[in-house]
Image (spheres, helix red, strand yellow):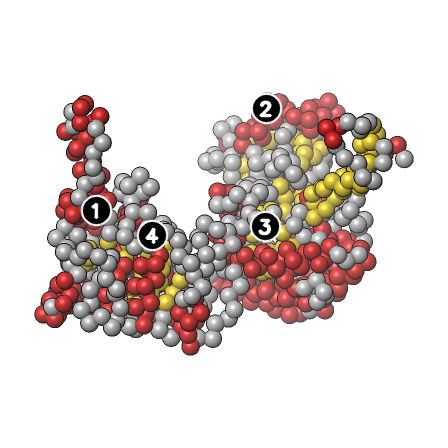
Amino acid sequence: MDSVDPTRAFVNRVKRIVVKVGTAVVTRGDGRLALGRLGALCEQLKDINAQGYEVILVTSGAVGLGRQRLRYRRLANSSFADLQNPQNDFDGKACAAVGQSSLMALYDTMFSQLDVTSSQLLVTDSVFRDEAFRKQLSETVKSLLKLRVVPIFNENDAVSTRKAPYEFCLQDSSGIFWDNDSLAGLLALELKADLLVLLSDVEGLYDGPPTDPKSKLIHTYVKEIHHGEITFGDKSRVGRGGMTAKVNAAVCAAYGGIPVVITSGYATDNIKKVLRGDRIGTVFHQDAHLWTLVKEEGARDLAVSARESSRQLRALGSKDRRKILLDVADALVANEGQIIAENEADIAVAQENGYEKALISRLALKPGKIAALATSIRKLADMEEPIGRVLQKTELAEGLVLEKVSCPLGVLLVVFESRPDALVQIASLAIQSRNGLLLKGGKEAKRSNAILHKVITSAIPENVGGKLIGLVNTRDEIPDLLKLDDVIDLVIPRGSNKLVSQIKESTKIPVLGHADGICHVYIDKSANEDMAKRIVLDAKTDYPAACNAMETLLVHKDLVTDDGGFKQIISGLQDLGVTLYGGPKASTVLNIPETSSFHHEYSSLACAVEIVDDVTAAINHIHEHGSAHTDCIVTEDHEVAETFLSQVDSAAIFHNASTRFCDGARFGLGAEVGISTSRIHARGPVGVEGLLTTRWILRGNGQVVDSDRGVKYTHKDLLTST
């Protein structure tokens, strides 16, 4: 487990917590209650209540709920003539009176379903002038908390006499509040809470409008630094407060000794994350100005630095870029001992945590791996210069020549799991293609990734800068990076189906990758039996955790009656420890368990087997259950082979060769950043070419369009004609 951020160490002393949820969180855009968010909030409060925390809730939403109910009632009671005339909005106090009981009834129902008792406490600003009231308030809350009851506070807007906003500050001995944010701050002080969490509709406090991608989240608020720098936007779309009110309340509570965190109420577990010490939201603390804060390099800083460094790299010649790669290879070999030591520490932690063998296998840097990686990088360095290649050259008109040339994409974000060797391959490809790079590896390879990143970036000269390749340390930074579609040009996820799907759903940046590696080997009736056995055993057992390992074996029905080849293949797999699961036909014939799904990536010594009628049935099976990664046919019939190769719609299709050949190094690409099953841009193993795009360069001598008068277009191909 990662150590708690020093700026969040105070969470270790929290016992009593005040949580404030605003109208923008408890309601949807149309004004109706956001039942999903309310339910998630109640579940969080129930869980932390069960963990021994004393939980106090301050809620808004009564006025909005009451307005909705009154609108419905007026509509139900209106005549047609009434509907023709404009009608005034409702009195806010009437809305509060109607909505408060409904809001509390909803909380009561939700908490009751979770076996939690809640209570209602309505207050007004004026009652806090009374010392006796304040004392009684503390006693009542103390009694409720002792019984594990959740007190729910709200301002009693229906009878409040306040006409204008008051300033809430510690110097105001009356303690009058203006909104539920300042009420929450006041209660935190009165009830001697250890933490105040203000839930907002954004992640926290930004140094600019939250909708502006250039705005950065302020993780730690220091009044002396940030007070004059922040421009607040509009107030809440529905409540009286907004971020200005939250910051005012947070500053007052923090300087009164109560730590405060402003974070999003839209997430389902942010309160738990705050209590866990995760670096989310914005923290306010009375000692923040005394902390030695490491300069916060946010997501945008990392991406911008990578872009700037990549432009410096592009300015270098081919020899200089080649030298960087050779220096990286030498540095890896020179530091092999330290790299292996850190990798072994990662493996030990993974084993202690009970990780699956397949993950530990991907995590391990086996003997000879560093030398092999260095060799791959040297081969990459010796490859033809990929940048500036003229792909098309056309004379548009006399003296006007257009070229289409290769160029880098820009900045890549690669999120990968388990395999630290992937970091080396990806980094070397970024240098060769002259792209900036941001890397986020899995926590299980934290030590390995850190040392590899350090070794590689130390070999990059100062005139380019080590920030060409940035290493993202926490998962919390990924959502911010995925918003940077103006800086990051391509996201490449390498990992589970869940990881790839989450990234695709969370960004507008183009995503290149594959979700599953469900690879098939189809043995046709004309297959050479010895060849088929070699291919199947290699495809499944050479490296079962690889995404190009065979996950489903398809066999022509005519081979099942054969006493030789098919049974030898099956027994060969079983002898090597492979667990077999059959389809409806194969499970009966082979007397093996039936698979629950053909669309399953085992990533281990297990696979599915099914019997098919012919090559067409095999193709249909692959299209229905496959992942368009790598599929193979074993056959001596050339016509059947061509049918398979032309009709299977996968990124890689093989004839009489193991699926394990689908690899960037084996394809001669030097290395690979991943394998893509996308049909746009790169497909299959993605090497340098997959990380490039093109641009147009036009050279003339003063030509103008002038509505195409006087321009005689020739469109002559100069590349093939020379």
**Mark 2 or mark 3: whose residue is earlier in sequence:** 3
Towards the viewer: 581 or 407? 407
| Horizontal arrangement in the rendering, residue 56 relative to residue 329 (left or right) | left
Query: Could you say where residue 420 lies in the image, as x and y percent from the top left?
Result: 61, 58
**Mark 4 or mark 2: whose residue is earlier in sequence:** 4
**Mark 1 or mark 4: whose residue is earlier in sequence:** 1
Where is residue 526, by image quadrant? Answer: top right
Q: How much space separates mark 2 and mark 1, taking CA atoms?
A: 63 Å
| Horizontal arrangement in the rendering, residue 181 relative to residue 689 (left or right) | left
Q: Which residue is mark 1?
A: 63
| Circle 1: residue type | Val
Q: How much space separates mark 1 and mark 3, taking CA atoms?
A: 43 Å
Where is residue 524, by image quadrant? Answer: top right
Numbered badge on residue 235: 4
| Circle 2: residue type | Ala
Q: Which residue is mark 2?
A: 617
Q: How much space separates mark 4 and mark 2, taking CA atoms?
A: 62 Å
Looking at the rendered image, the quarter that the C terminus falls into is: top right
**Mark 4 or mark 3: whose residue is earlier in sequence:** 4
Report the residue at 61% width, 26% height from top.
Answer: 619
Q: Reply above or below: 247 against 497.
A: below
Q: How much space separates mark 4 and mark 3, taking CA atoms?
A: 31 Å
Where is residue 547, by image quadrant? Answer: top right
Mark 3 lies on a secondary structure that is loop
Mark 2 lies on a secondary structure that is helix
Outermost residue, left direction? 132
Q: How much space separates mark 1 and mark 4, taking CA atoms?
A: 16 Å
Report the residue at 17% width, 57% height from top.
Answer: 162
Numbered badge on residue 488: 3
| Circle 3: residue type | Ile
Query: Could you say where residue 693 lies in the image, as x and y percent from the top left?
Result: 69, 43
